[in-house]
Image: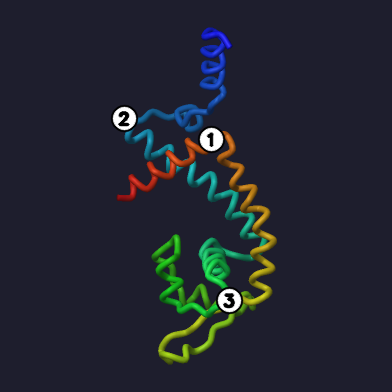
Amino acid sequence: MTEQCLYFLIDKFRKSVMHIDEELDGRFRNDYHRGLINLIFTANMLHADFHQLLKNQGLTTQQYNVLKILRGFGAEPRSIDFLRKRMLDRKSDMSRIIDKLVNKKLVDRVECNADRRQKDVTITPSGLSVLSKLDTAEKKGDQLLHNLSLKEVKTLNELLDKIRT
């Protein structure tokens, strides 16, 4: 491939990418401000699509997160505190979330044998069934990053981790 061809392809790619400035028809104080707005806008876009999938199953993102945690750690009962520490939204009202999942028969809650003040939570077969329906949708969600190489995805993860430190 000639150098001229390579520059043509790079230029074509740059023109095909929708930049935040165009998406919002906006102006930004500086590149830091642009980056922050870009991050928020992109996260909101991804979240809105996934939120609709969850809504179709009658779940909130927090309820989905609890189900995923329970399935990920196996059939052993987990305490509400254990779940709280692993939530994506750490300000979640865990008792209320668990109550709603119990009412939907997606989890069971029982008194902890070791500490009667604690409650143990397990996912039910119905909860596992709901998650299996959503697994396909979650895999499609992975496709949202399909235009990034594996190296770029790893860099993205490193940058996001760095932002939070």
Q: In this figure, which residue is indicated by the disc labeled 1?
A: 148
Q: Nearer the viewer, mark 1 or mark 3?
A: 3
Helix or strand or loop: what does disc 1 sit on? loop
Image vertical order of residue 112 relative to residue 11, above or below = below
Q: Nearer the viewer, mark 2 or mark 1?
A: 1
- Residue 26 is situated, as x and y percent measured from the top left of the image, at 42, 30
Kindly indicate whether the residue at mark 1 contacts the one at mark 2 (C-beta within 8 angstroms).
Answer: no
Q: In this figure, which residue is indicated by the disc labeled 2?
A: 30
For badge 1, the amino acid type reads Leu
In front of the other: 116 or 113: 113
Helix or strand or loop: what does disc 2 sit on? loop
For badge 3, the amino acid type reads Ala
- Residue 70 is situated, as x and y percent measured from the top left of the image, at 54, 71
Residue ID at (37%, 40%):
36
Dividing the image into 4 quarters, which one contains the N terminus? top right
Q: In this figure, which residue is indicated by the disc labeled 3?
A: 75
Residue ID at (63%, 50%):
139
Q: Residue furthest front?
A: 1
Category of crowding for the residue at label 2, using alpha-carbon neighbours closer than 10 angstroms: few (below 14), some (14–19), many (at least 20): few
Image vertical order of residue 90 relative to residue 23, above or below = below
Image vertical order of residue 25 relative to residue 92, above or below = above
